[in-house]
Amino acid sequence: MDGGSSDRTVELARHYGAQVCSGTHLAERRLLGVKLSHGEMILMLDSDQVLSPDAVEKCVHQCATGEFDALFLTESPLSTKSIVQKALALDRRLVHRLRDTHPVFGTLLPRFFRADFLRTVSWPTQVTANDHAYIYYSCWKAGAKMTISDAQVFHHEPQSFSAYARKSYRWGYYYASEIRINPTVAVTHAFPRRVYFSRDGLGNRWILAVFLLYTVKIIAAGSGGFLSIGEATNKKLKRSLLHREHLAIAG
């Protein structure tokens, strides 16, 4: 699924026989990919993620029995060299240690699905920032049987606060327009993770770095959100003025 890649990703994918699809929003592209796929299993992997060599084998084994419809993979940063990456590593550890899989207040997301189940599920397609959270929420409402797998997926996390701020800014830009789609999911996923306030979280020496990182996220995402709202308001004003001009001409 192409989200506007500017490198050779699309070219290489087509070279190896992949069917490349595109869409306006990320959730729309994911749904299109599900509809076009022909396999028995579906893996949703982002461009900044890397699977462990045995991840697919483990997931297929767990889902092939029919006991589970979807799996949460064990997630962690690919590198933990910087303060930002160490803070994000703690974030992942806390989430998995406390197995916080609640579809609204939790933070884990299923990535591996039985295709025959996922094809029966629909979700809002006009979303980008929290697209995977909406997919999970829709699967949960459809009665999906899910569990945490020990199959691993690693994230290429930002190394610096500035890189993390840029990523959060983009998230905030798209987030502002999604609150009206499902306020329950959108709002709760903007809050600090509740695992931060657990005994394990507050007792860890890196928790201050985690809260600092969250502060950066709020400021950057808020800036992106305000820009998005401003652009949307400007477009509405322009449409209103054009409508009035047409009415004046017609009158």
Image: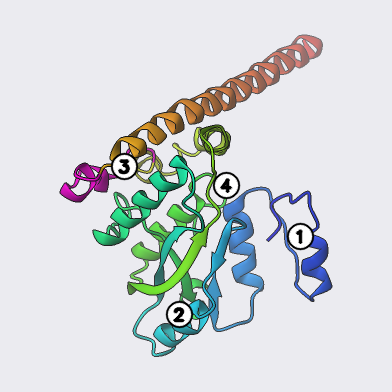
Nearest the eye: 83 or 233: 83
249 displayed left or right of 144: right
The CA span between labels 3 and 2 is 32 Å
Q: Which mark is residue 168?
A: none
Q: Is residue 75 above or below residue 41?
A: above
Which residue is the site of mark 3?
206
Residue 196: in magenta span? yes
Residue 3 in percent (x, y) is at: 69, 52
Q: Which residues are magenta?
A: 190-204
Mark 1 in CB contact with mark 2 (< 8 angstroms): no
Among the two numbered marks 1 and 4 on one chain, the one whose residue lies closer to the N terminus: 1
Q: CA distance from mark 4 to mark 3?
A: 36 Å
Mark sitting earlier along the chain (1/2): 1
Cα separation between marks 2 and 4? 29 Å
Q: Amino acid at mark 4?
A: Gln
x%, y% of residue 178?
49, 39
Q: Indicate which disc residue 59 carries.
A: 2
